Structure formats: structure tokens, C-alpha cells
Image (cartoon, rainbow, N blue to C red):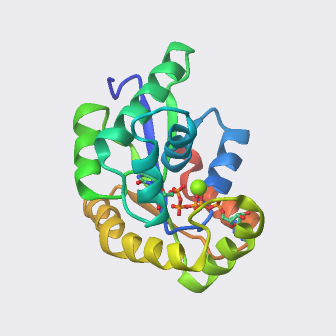
Amino acid sequence: FSPDDVKVIFVLGGPGVGKGTQCANLVKDYHFVHLSAGDLLREERTRSGTEYGELIETYIKEGKIVPMEVTIVLLENAMKKSIEAGKHKFLIDGFPRQMDQALKFEEVVVPSQFTLFFDCDEETMTKRITERGKTSGRSDDNPESMLKRFRTFNETSMPVVNYFDGQKKVVKVDGAKSVDAVYADVKAHIADRLK
Ligand code: UP5
Ligand code: MG
């Protein structure tokens, strides 16, 4: 895709920080297509008979990163569909979460405009996931998987945020506040770049 036509904002932050929630807010007010890499992987997992189903489930439960070949194809296909429908602005939620994915995506798909990064302490994120876990049915919303997700985030995904930060391409927002307060901060920081 050409960066003149296709705009991508990465939305990153720890497990349960509120990436999906804030993307939904942005979609309501601006014309974005919201693509959650985790949602795409969960969809692919449940699609019967796909060769990747079991593999994806194992990675998600273990809080590990699914090999990027799988995720990038899912994202690319979803983007193609939207572009054919005339939609060119994307919030890519929960991706890239490993350095190789960041480099590959920007090389073969399109460079990102910037990364919206939600910062939050683990205690707050743990509370949110525990609450959601009561009804989410997600196989990784349990204490054991949660610890693994936090570890992967700190060890493997934070380097991606730091890499983009080094390029002055990170907008950092405090994700520990209320949903409305976080969204107000998001708009204050990036409203001029959302048009
Ligand atoms: N909530 C949200 N904001 C709140 C606020 N400000 N105050 C109070 N409550 C708030 O929110 C989580 C919960 O908190 C909700 O109940 C919400 O109401 C509440 P949500 O918006 O869902 O947070 P989000 O950051 O989207 O949390 P999520 O659990 O989706 O983040 P993860 O990054 O853990 O999960 P994701 O789906 O992105 O990935 C899951 C797994 O898929 C990964 O662990 C990995 O195994 C795999 N994966 C890959 O391998 N590769 C990828 O590229 C992507 C995923
Ligand atoms: Mg999410």
C-alpha cells in the first residue's frame, strides 16, 4: 500500500489497558477502521478447519506472540477489504508486539504514522482483566495466562514502543484513568492528527 493513500496508527499498551475500548471511541468520532490483531487471531482460531486454529490457541493461552506470518496476512487481508470499500484509515490495535513484526509490517505493508501508547500499572490492568474475565470467555483471561501476558509485554513488546519512541513516533497517554478521562487525553494529544 502507498503511505499517500493508506494511513496506519498503531495502538499499543499492556494487556487489558483499554486499547479496544479507546479504539471504539475513536471509531465513533472519526472515520477509522479498527483492526484488533488479537480479535483477528481469535476469529481465525475458531474458523473451523483452519490449519492455524490449534497453533493460535496455544500461543494465546501461553501469552506468546503468534508467528508474524499468520498475523500479517490476517491484517493485510482485512485492510485490503476495507480499502476496496473505500476506507483508508486504520487503527491497528495490539500489533506490532515484537520487533520483527514492526520491521516487517512497515516494510511490506505500509509505514505507520505514529503509535498511540497507553501506559498503565499492572495492578490496574490486572483488576480490569479479572473483572472482564468473569464474562469474556477469553481463554487467556485467567491469573496464569495473565502473568505470562504481562511478561511477554514487558520483555518483547515494550522494545517495539521504545523503538518507535526513538523515532519520535510515540504519543504516550496515561491509561490508568477513567475511560472518559483517557479518551479526553487521547483527543487532546492527537486531535490535529486524526482528520
Ligand atoms: N476498561 C478499559 N478501559 C478502562 C478504563 N479506563 N477504566 C476502567 N476500565 C476500563 O479493556 C479491558 C477491560 O477493561 C474491559 O473490560 C474494559 O471495559 C475495561 P479493553 O479495551 O478490552 O483492553 P485491551 O487493551 O484491548 O485488552 P486486551 O485484553 O484485548 O489486550 P491484550 O493486548 O492482552 O490482548 P489482544 O487481544 O491484543 O491479544 C491477545 C493475545 O493474542 C496476545 O497475548 C497474543 O498471544 C496474541 N497476539 C499475537 O500473537 N500477535 C498479535 O499481533 C496480537 C495478539
Ligand atoms: Mg483488545
Residue visible at 72% across and 67% down? Answer: 132
Q: Nearer the viewer, residue 51 or 155?
A: 51
Front residue (pair 193, 52): 52
Instruction: Give the tally of numbered discs.
Output: 0
* Front in this rendered view, residue 181 or 51: 51
Q: Relative to 77, is 55 above or below?
A: below
Residue at the image point whose x is 49% and y is 28% from the top: 78
Q: Which sits in the foreground, 35 or 192?
A: 35
Q: Dividing the image into four quarters, tell me where ligand 2 lies.
A: bottom right
When the figure is inspected, residue 107 is found, relative to residue 180, above or below; the finding is above
Residue 6: x percent and y percent?
A: 42, 27
Residue 116 appearing in the image: no
Q: Report the residue at 59% width, 35% height from top.
A: 32
Residue 164 spot, x, y in % from top left: 30, 58
What percent of the width, then of the height, locates residue 148?
44, 75
- Image point 55% across, 22% down: which residue? 87
* Residue sticking out furthest to the front: 49
Looking at the rendered image, the quarter that the C terminus falls into is top right
31 to the left or right of 52: right
Which quarter of the rendered picture does the N terminus lie within? top left
Residue 17 visible in the current orientation: yes
Image quadrant assignment for residue 69: top left
Q: Where residue 192 sits in the image (x, y, percent)?
A: 55, 45
